[in-house]
Image (spheres, rainbow, N blue to C red):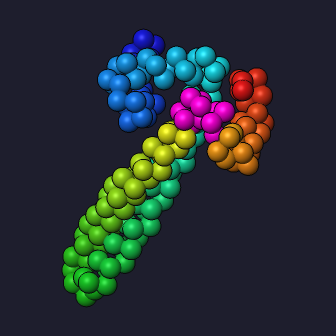
């Protein structure tokens, strides 16, 4: 548990925002979430799971495209089955890796929004009142016992 306090995905946001060392950032961001009562909220963020599933879907789709292309390219040869298998595996791998890299940007953006909202909810309310209200309402509905303003 002590390691999680220092080494977590949220620490990257604090490093980027404030320039803390990674260990200090991990400790500070976990203190922030504890003060807000958000320990269950941050453990339940489903964005990474959804993005992983989409990456798998993209990988399978590009694998199927690779399978079709390899099948067409090797049509009439004795090794068409092997070519199709190689095309599928190559497409699967390529699609999965590229989409995982791209979705990593989205995951980092979501983490940043959550940390910034925890750090300065009043500033968010002043600068973006409609978005702030929607976010507060959504969090209250999802985590009625955990979310504290």
From the viewer's perspective, tell me whether residue 88 is left or right of residue 82. right
Q: Residue furthest front?
A: 126
Query: Magenta span covers which residues?
Result: 114-124
Q: Residue at x 72, y 24 (%)?
A: 148
Q: Residue at x 39, y 74 (%)?
A: 65
From the viewer's perspective, tell me whether residue 11 is left or right of residue 90. right
Q: Residue furthest bottom?
A: 76
> In terms of secondary structure, what is the magenta stretch mainly?
helix
The quarter of the rendered structure image containing the N terminus is top left
Instruction: Indicate whether residue 122 is drawn in magenta.
Output: yes
- Tell me, yes or no, if residue 56 can be seen here: no
- Tell me, yes or no, if residue 38 can be seen here: yes
Q: Residue at x 69, y 39 (%)?
A: 125
Give how far across and how far down residue 131 sits, in percent. Answer: 69, 48
When asked about the image quadrant of residue 61, the answer is bottom left
From the viewer's perspective, tell me whether residue 95 is left or right of residue 120. left
Position above or below: 22 against 131: above
Foreground of the two, 88 or 105:
105
Q: Residue at x 48, y 46 (%)?
A: 109
The quarter of the rendered structure image containing the C terminus is top right
Give how far across and how far down residue 19 sits, in percent. Answer: 35, 29
Give how far across and how far down residue 50 sits, in percent. Answer: 55, 48
């Amino acid at each position: 548990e002590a390691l999680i306090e220092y080494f977590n995905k949220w620490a990257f946001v604090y490093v980027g925002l404030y320039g803390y060392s990674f260990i200090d950032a991990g400790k500070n961001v976990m203190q922030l979430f504890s003060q807000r009562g958000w320990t269950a909220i941050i453990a339940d963020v489903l964005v990474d799971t959804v993005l992983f599933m989409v990456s798998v879907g993209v990988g399978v789709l590009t694998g199927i495209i690779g399978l079709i292309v390899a099948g067409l390219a090797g049509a009439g040869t004795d090794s068409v089955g092997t070519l199709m298998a190689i095309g599928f595996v190559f497409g699967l791998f390529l699609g999965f890796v590229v989409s995982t890299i791209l979705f990593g940007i989205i995951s980092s953006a979501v983490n940043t929004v959550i940390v910034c909202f925890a750090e300065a909810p009043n500033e968010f309310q002043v600068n973006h009142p409609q978005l702030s209200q929607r976010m507060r309402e959504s969090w209250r509905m999802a985590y009625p016992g955990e979310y504290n303003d």
